């Protein structure tokens, strides 16, 4: 049985629920709907606490690029002149493909540093990005991106599951155990986030220094 993320009232991160239709396969180009649209959970988020609602397909999600071995042909984003709106770091300088973060209406997307985004979500425990709340399908897509690009073991679904288990724990011992696991996960994610920030800051300073020497 697979897992699907659904949003519950009072929960910061979308929680994880069992779903027989969930799998690790990417939706095909000809079927840009949420892969969990046939499930009994609304991928847009439940309207009431612990409420199962009719399935509603997510807005069209951008197709995420498959991570290929480093090379000229595979680094399509190296020609981009965009800057990540989350970090201010040039998209072209990322050592991995950017994540296509769709807008609230699902009509367009912007390129962001997906690893930074995932780590930030785990550390903060929130899913509000650039003025909107990420939907379950966005989170699922981001977790898949992290897995395919081999960007570490950090999964938002894992943090969400631990958060939900803490909320529903029947005894203090179980709650304390899950809380410890979540704290360990967030500590590791924070270290990875700080390392990523340091690397990007160092690279930007190096470029600025090189530019000043050339008189640019």
Image (cartoon, rainbow, N blue to C red):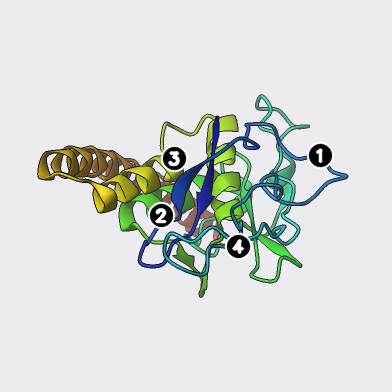
Q: What residue sits right under mark 1 in the picture?
A: 28
Q: Is residue 196 visible?
A: no
Q: Residue at x 76, y 58 (%)?
A: 60
C-alpha distance separating marks 3 and 2: 10 Å
In the picture, the disc for residue 155 is 3
Residue at the spot x=74%, y=32% of the render? 74
Q: Nearer the viewer, mark 2 or mark 4?
A: 4
Mark 1 or mark 2, earlier in chain: 1
Single out the residue that lies furthest toward the right: 30
Q: Dot 2 corresponds to which residue?
A: 121
- Relative side of 182 to 38, left or right: left
Q: Which mark is residue 153?
A: none
Q: Which mark identifies residue 44?
A: 4
- Disc 2 is placed on an element classified as helix
Report the Cα–Cα distance between label 3 and label 4: 20 Å
Q: Position of residue 10 (x, y in %)?
A: 35, 67
Residue 184: name its quadrant. top left
Secondary structure under tag 4 reads loop
Task: Tell me where residue 70 appears, x and y as whole percent.
Answer: 65, 27
Residue 22: x and y in percent read 62, 37
Q: CA distance from mark 1 to mark 2?
A: 27 Å
Q: CA distance from mark 1 to mark 3?
A: 23 Å
Q: Nearer the viewer, mark 3 or mark 4?
A: 4
């Amino acid at each position: 049985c697979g897992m699907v993320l659904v949003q519950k009232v009072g929960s910061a991160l979308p929680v994880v629920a069992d779903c027989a239709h969930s799998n690790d396969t990417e939706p095909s180009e000809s079927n840009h709907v949420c892969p969990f649209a046939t499930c009994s959970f609304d991928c847009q988020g439940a309207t009431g606490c612990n409420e199962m609602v009719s399935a509603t397909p997510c807005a069209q999600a951008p197709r995420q690029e498959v991570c290929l071995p480093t090379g000229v042909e595979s680094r399509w984003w190296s020609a981009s002149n965009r800057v990540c709106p989350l970090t201010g770091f040039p998209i072209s300088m990322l050592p991995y493909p950017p994540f296509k973060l769709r807008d609230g209406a699902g009509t367009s997307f912007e390129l962001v540093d997906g690893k930074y985004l995932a780590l930030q979500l785990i550390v903060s425990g929130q899913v509000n990005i650039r003025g909107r709340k990420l939907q379950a399908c966005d989170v699922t897509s981001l977790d898949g991106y992290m897995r395919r690009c081999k960007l570490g073991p950090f999964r938002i679904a894992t943090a969400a599951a631990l958060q939900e288990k803490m909320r529903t724990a029947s005894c203090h011992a179980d709650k304390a155990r899950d809380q410890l696991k979540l704290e360990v996960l967030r500590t590791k994610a924070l270290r990875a986030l700080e390392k990523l920030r340091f690397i990007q800051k160092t690279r930007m300073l190096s470029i600025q220094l090189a530019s000043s020497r050339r008189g640019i």
